[in-house]
Amino acid sequence: MAYLLPSLPYPTSFANTVYILFFYCIIDCMFVYSMCNSVCVVAQVRPLHGSGCGQQQEAVGMETRPETVSIFRTQENDPACQSEQHLGQYYTVPASHFHTVFPHGLPPRYQQQVKTFNEGCVMVRQPALELISHLKRADYINPTLRYLLYGVKGSGKTMSLCHAVHYCSTQGWLVLHIPDAHLWVKNCKELLPSSYHASRFDQPIQASNWLRNFRTTNEHFLSKIKLRQRYVWTKRESTEEGRPLGELVDMGVSRVKSSSDVVGAVLKELRLQAGGTEGGFRLAVAVDGVNGLWGRTTLKKEDKSPVAPEELTLVHNLRKMINNDWCGGAVIATLSQTGSLYAPSSAYLPQELLGEEGFDSMDPFIPVPVSLYSEKEFESCYLYYLDHIHFHHWLQHPHSQTEEGKKELIFLSNRNPSVLERLCAFL
Amino acid sequence: MKCSNIVTQMQMLLLSTYFLFSPERRTANMAASGGRTVGSFLWKCGNCCFNFNTVSSNLTRQVLSRQLCVSAVLHRKNLAAAGPEKFSEEFIKKQVEEFNIGKRHLANMMGEDPETFTQGDINRSIAYLFPSGLFDKKAKPLMKHPDEVFPKQRAVQWGADGRPFHFLFYTGKQSYYSLMHDTFTKALAVEKHQDRLRGKDLFTQDAKQISLVGSRWLLKEELEELLVETISEHDYARFIQLMERLLSLPYCSVEEDFVQRYRRQLEIQSSKQQVQPLQYDQHGVAYSTGDGRRKTAMGTVLLRDSGSGSISINGTNYVHYFPVLQDREQLMFPLHFMEVLGRFDMQCSVSGGGHSSQAGALRLAISRAMLSFLSEGQVETMRQAGLLTPDPRIKERKKPGQEGARRKFTWKKR
């Protein structure tokens, strides 16, 4: 890479070439950073590692232009250290953590955006901060607290959930992230009758997928946690007591047929061991679209009669997880109308989406409302898209940079984050 | 407009004879069949009551069929080329008499005073008695003075011995040249009058002038219609030149009547936007309402000042009601055009149509509601931008023999 960065005494004339080279820079930034101890001209090396609270990492070497103060970005990449002063600002999730923490939890459009921008930036918003402060202050001796994020469509519930999950993982908790509970109650090609319980149904594909992602997220825990009970899968296979959890998970991934039961076993073990004093860990259960667990399903049995959610093994076990009869962790859930079945599009309140049964099961919970962007948040989102240092005018249209254009964007999106993102995608 | 309850059979009968069914639209075939249906109708009411109706109904049927048959000629615009006259003078005179009598009967039927029954009253009565669902104005029933219905025709220009009546007949354009001669004679008369005044020392430059404001010269087509003969552009230009020369004389007001015969009043531009005054609610906030229509959708808007740009449609948020970007852009257009994007709060209600026409209806309603907040110049710019024009497009009618309005059936070779 060094041969691409000849050192010149005249930085301004080199600006164009640097811009073109920047694409290479951004991928190899970490590599360049280490190489940057020698004299080289780089536009701006942004530290993609976030480490510690409040440490500022400056670009090494000569800077071609003065560091512009970004009002909408913050260097504070650790969720634990973020506070109200960072409200409305974007922080970057370190690229190394990105794939381990969020293998499956992010909204699909956001994943595309991350791929395009080559960095994962999350806005610090009020609901997420509130959630994190609750998590910090709660004592984990009492039965688990349940937090429910609700709001209109596209207001940022899933992103707040992911923010909280990032916090939990940086604090060393075990994260149980179910990306979308609705995926378990619809579009299932294979429904096997459960071996464990006669009237229930297994979903092998979904269960094994989820186990794989679970393994990616919580690698370091898998060897530490030991099973407390013996599990018999078939006549010839069983997992003994005292074996590490990792073995169980591997077995579930490889033996797809019994993966749903493995999921059930994993959840049970974690539930029992979460608040334990010896080798205790905190457990975070993050469920997106939790209202899918109590509605109706679109799955049908062989005789064309509809399947109720409690007849699915995965759903049954997950419901047990959400009950607050265990301690040593927290349950963070989001309501979602987008993937939900048989729910009107205008419904967003817990009462409407959870239904009677769901509401009774979730009760008592701490509701966390997620609203549309405030003025400040909208401002910072707008500046993020406008950030020409990094993205070469993501908002290409010249009119969008004016005050008028901003007002138009406000009107057309009504400050709804997802609508705004879709709007800016083609501008 | 009262309708007398006792519309006697006789009156209806008599009315139908004077009444012409859409003379401009009918062809000969349709006229014949129309004559037949009218005849049958007449027969029915004839049989109910009177004996003498058989005779009169025969007569009326003949008369009616004759009227309807000749109506085909009325298509023709080229008056001079119409050839020898189709309607004789007595015929036209008889038509005029019948029209007047029919007018009186109609007035009696409607319970109005026959003396003061105007053409406007006639039109309204006919529209009331014979309601028509047709869209084309020319296809609807009408009852007008025969001079307006039958085109003007030239009487025969020469006598039994073949000698023409008018001395300018052999110029080919006798009415035109006689008009030019008349005008010139008038000009000479004015000059003579001026000389006489000069002789008496009463000549003043600032004599009373003819007021030409708000009127225009006759158009070439109108002049042709008046003279009942075709004239060329050059001729028309010469005529106007001569009239202008007449007007240039200081004492032309002597011949004011003659000049005014060849001028028409200009229409007063009365179709301005009616801007309603602003209303204030109890907190002193200004608000105004507007409504608009597009296709089948109707929308109303309540626009409130000093707001934050929030919009609610039928009680729900506008982003939720119009998920399509295009509809929201339509709502945004009037506000963005006048640069008042964040100023107003809106409460809208809309019904009918589809999402696109609802958005269009709301756009018109917003523009109309905004008029009360804007100045004259801004209203003019809005009008020129087309924000205040209701979109006249509606769904085109499906025609028989075709699958849709334009689409024909699949063509099969055999």
Image (cartoon, helix red, strand yellow):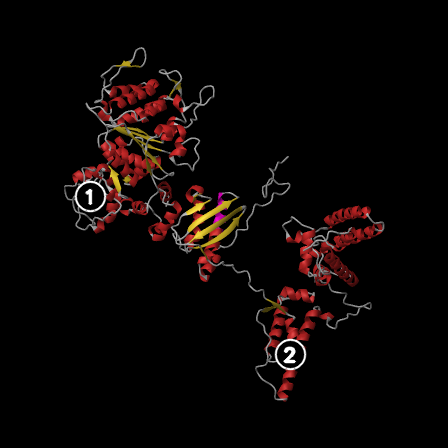
Which dot, 1 or 2, sits closer to the camera?
A: 2
Direction from residue A23 to residue A419 in the image, left or right: right
Looking at the rendered image, the quarter that the N terminus of chain B falls into is: bottom right
Tell me if residue B49 comes above or below residue A178 in the rendering: below
- Residue B254's disc is 2
- Residue B369's disc is none
- Residue A182 in sight in this render: no
Provide residue A186's location: percent of width, then percent of height. 41, 27
Residue type beneath disc 2? Val
Same chain under badges 1 and 2? The reply is no
Q: Quadrant of residue A74?
A: top left
- Name, please, the residue furthest toward the top: A235
**Residue that badge 1 annotates:** A5
For the residue carrying disc 1, how many other residues have a C-alpha within 10 Å: few (<14), some (14-19), or many (20+)? some
Distance CA(mark 1)–CA(mark 2): 99 Å
Provide residue B108's location: percent of width, then percent of height. 74, 57
Direction from residue B318 to residue B404 in the image, left or right: right
Highlighted range, magenta: B355-364
Provide residue A141's location: percent of width, then percent of height. 23, 27
